[in-house]
Image (cartoon, helix red, strand yellow):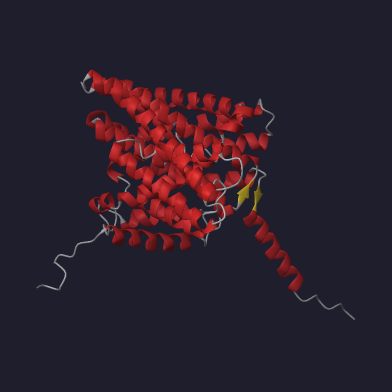
Amino acid sequence: MNFLPDWPLTSNTLFYFGFLLFCGALGGFVTHRWPWLPSITGFMLVGLIAGPNVLGLVDYVALADSRIIIDVALGLILYRLGLSLDIKQLVHDRSLIVISLLESTLTFVVVFFGMDWMGLHGLAAAVIAAIAVSSSPAVLIHVANELGASGPVTERAKSLVALNNVLAFLIFSALLPLLYSNADAPMVTILGGPVYQLLGSALLGGVMGMALHLAARKTKEAHQYHLALVVGAVAFTLGAALTLKLSTLFAPLVLGIVVRSIERTELIANLEFGPAFELFFIALFVYAGANLHVSEMVQYAPAALVLVLGRSLAKWLGVGLTAKFFAASNRQAATTGLLLIPMAGLAIGLADTTLTLFQQQGAVVSSVILAAVAVLETIGPPISAKALRWSGDSLQADVAQAQADAVDVTTQPKPQQEA
């Protein structure tokens, strides 16, 4: 019996998960030398250097094998984002819905005509515009947590990002029949596929949200089990979505929205994940950096640049101008729109879905979206950090620094007076 490992050595999902975390942590540490640079940028740079495009320590096959870990990380992030969207609050404060609808419409129109101007016409331009409506919850949540940001701009931005992602998924689902028809799919698939995806994912997330809420009520005296309940509910939702061929992006988002909306007392919606949640952010962004397709980014750079500029301007102006009608200050209106500029998780997922279902359209859509995501995930974290600092919201990082400076001043010896 051979007790030695096979040669060449084979790796596994745990090996690459550990590799992503270890390298990502080092990248995040390096970025702390530059306070203006968020750690997310360090995570992505480490992934890019270690990935197939530079050193090749991790290839695309290995990245595909570790995809399940990234799905769990993204699912937890989307669940947390869903918690920021309270249906009861939306009923009383309809300004959020108005702002999101106008900003999303402006984004779709600007990106659609921008892609048409770049030679990407019809359905491909519409799908890219639909995906461009989405925003990155991971960047906003991570940067806000890193700075300890809290206040009206932070909370409104989280709600708008959640609404952006819901609207992006709805628009994408509305375009699915046209994509199926263009691919000569049978009528049953054209009509039934999108409905099944949308309603099935919403139903799955809703049922699991109610189950999580009931479990939290039954165990409200045992808080030590609540984190396990949340992670278990999200993982179960993702597993069920994969089995039932539903959306692993929309279902956990609905799960969080339902939990937040049906709770009347603080049980699970305000659960603090603690420093351990940083592990999922590190793995997600190192993976994103390693998974960048540089050749496709270069090929579709002009279209991606138009997408980045048009989308960023539409979101900033759309939110800024609309928020002014609802008594927001100039500073709040200007900075809220900047927090919607990053684009990542849902955009990548919808692009992958398009590529999987429709090879011809999906190749173009995926190339443009991935190139745009690479740019937006690079410039997005610094923009978000600056926006939160300019917003007027409370920042624990600044408070801690001010307290440390005050301590340094009080502990310094007083200069002796001249005789």
The residue positioned farthest toward the right in the image shown:
419
Of residues 334 and 194, which is closer to you in this image? 194
Image mark count: 0
Q: Quadrant of residue 175?
A: top left
The C terminus lies in which quarter of the figure? bottom right
Quick check: 418 left or right of 182? right
Quick check: 410 left or right of 221? right
For the point 37% across and 46% down, which residue is it? 236
* Placement of 418 over or under 259, stated as above or below: below
Q: Is residue 13 visible?
A: yes
Q: Quadrant of residue 350?
A: top left
* Placement of 146 over or under 363, stated as above or below: below
The residue positioned farthest toward the left in the image shown:
1
Q: Position of residue 218 (x, y in %)?
A: 52, 49
For the point 31% across and 49% down, which residue is it? 67
* Placement of 17 over or under 259, stated as above or below: below
Q: Position of residue 384 (x, y in %)?
A: 54, 45
Of residues 277 and 284, which is closer to you in this image? 277
Q: Position of residue 273 (x, y in %)?
A: 51, 54
Quick check: 105 left or right of 156? left
The residue positioned farthest toward the front in the image shown:
218
Q: Position of residue 417 (x, y in %)?
A: 86, 77
The N terminus lies in which quarter of the figure? bottom left
Of residues 146 and 212, which is closer to you in this image? 212
Quick check: 162 left or right of 336? left
* Placement of 229 over or under 342, stated as above or below: below
Q: Quadrant of residue 206?
A: top left
